[in-house]
Image: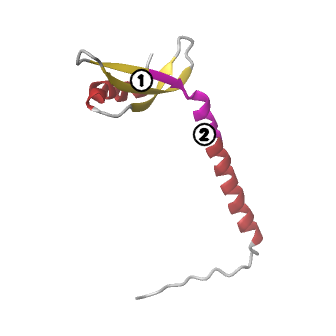
Amino acid sequence: MIHPDDRLKLQHFLRNWHRENAPIIRSIGVICANGEVVWGDVRVTMIPGLDGDSAAVSMVEDITERLAAQEHNQRLQHDLDAARERATLDILPAEFPMISIICWA
């Protein structure tokens, strides 16, 4: 079952994909029978047929682990940035004068 947050996006995608000349890729969430949410890249390409009709060729790639790794990387980057900020503030002495500079043009 398509994740509720992605249903409208997928409906719009399916209504309009045949108007595109290039392959289309969209990421959607899917709810499995056991309740687990997995994420996939849906790829659709139109293939012209010999009789003038076109056929859609589609593929879904499971990107759940990749998204989890990206989110983990973002959390680590956030933690690193926060640690750098704390380290910078710890280096400054408590009596460090704060100077405001105002410029007029």
Tell me which amino acid carries mark 2.
Gln
Tell me which amino acid carries mark 1.
Pro
Q: Position of residue 78 (x, y in %)?
A: 64, 50
Q: Position of residue 84 (x, y in %)?
A: 70, 60
Mark 1 or mark 2: name the one nearer the start of the chain: 1
Q: Is residue 77 left or right of residue 52?
A: right
Residue 78 vs 70, above or below: the answer is: below
Q: In the image as oriented, which residue stretches furthest toward the front? A: 50
Residue 57 vs 89, above or below: the answer is: above
Q: Mark number for residue 70?
A: 2
SS assignment at label 1: helix
Q: Is residue 9 left or right of residue 100?
A: left
Q: Is residue 97 left or right of residue 30?
A: right
Provide the residue designation for mark 1. 4
Residue 72 vs 91, above or below: the answer is: above
For image coordinates 46% across by 22% down, the residue present is: 59
Q: How many marks?
A: 2
88 and 61: which is toward the camera: 61
Dot 2 surroundings within 10 Å: few (below 14), some, or many (20 or more)?
few
Residue 14 vs 93, above or below: the answer is: above
Q: Mark number for residue 39?
A: none
- Range of residues picked out in magenta: 59-72
For image coordinates 38% across by 31% down, the residue present is: 23
Which is in the foreground here, disc 1 or disc 2? 2
Q: Position of residue 49 (x, y in %)?
A: 29, 18
Please identify the quadrant where the N terminus is shown.
top left
Quick check: is 34 in the magenta stretch?
Answer: no
Quadrant of the rendered structure where residue 82 is? bottom right
Mark 1 and mark 2: Cα distance apart in space: 22 Å
